[in-house]
Image (spheres, rainbow, N blue to C red):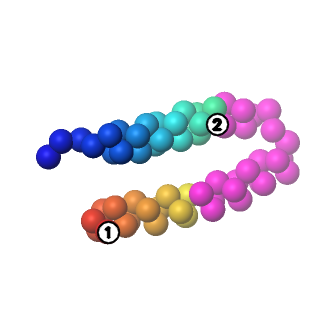
Amino acid sequence: MGTSGELIRLINYVDDITTTLRRINAFVAAMETDEKKRLAESLKAAGSNLDALVVRLEKGQ
């Protein structure tokens, strides 16, 4: 089975997410403690969604 154009786009989105996380990580040292906490909460929510999606994909759903 070949790789569809949609799959390539989705993989590119994942690459964009990875790049964004590297950029965020580089900026964290310059952030105030309260900013870090707010960002952590946002990332937790995104992480939960990511974890649920990975489980769904692994199950083939």
**Predominant secondary structure, magenta span:** helix
Which one is closest to the eye, mark 1 or mark 2? Answer: 1
Residue 11 versus residue 36: which sits nearer the camera? 11
Q: Which residues are magenta?
A: 24-46
On whether residue 32 falls in the magenta region, the answer is yes
**In this rendering, position of residue 39 left or right of residue 50:** right
Q: Position of residue 55 (x, y in %)?
A: 38, 65
Tell me if I can see residue 18 in this picture.
Answer: no
Q: Please give the name of the residue rendered at 54% of the width and 33% of the height, measured from the top-left corner.
A: 19
Residue 5's disc is none
Residue 8 versus residue 25: which sits nearer the camera? 8
Q: Position of residue 36 (x, y in %)?
A: 77, 48
Residue that carries the numbered disc 2 in the rendered image: 25
**In this rendering, position of residue 21 left or right of residue 42:** left
Q: Secondary structure at mark 2?
A: helix
Residue that carries the numbered disc 1 in the rendered image: 61
Residue 12 vertical position relative to residue 48 in the rendered view, above or below:
above
Q: Alpha carbon of mark 1 to alpha carbon of mark 2: how far?
A: 32 Å
Quarter assignment of residue 47: bottom right
Q: Secondary structure at mark 1?
A: loop
Could you tell me the amino acid type at mark 1?
Gln
Within 10 Å of disc 1 (Cα), the crowding (few <14, some 14-19, many 20+) is few
Could you tell me the amino acid type at mark 2?
Asn
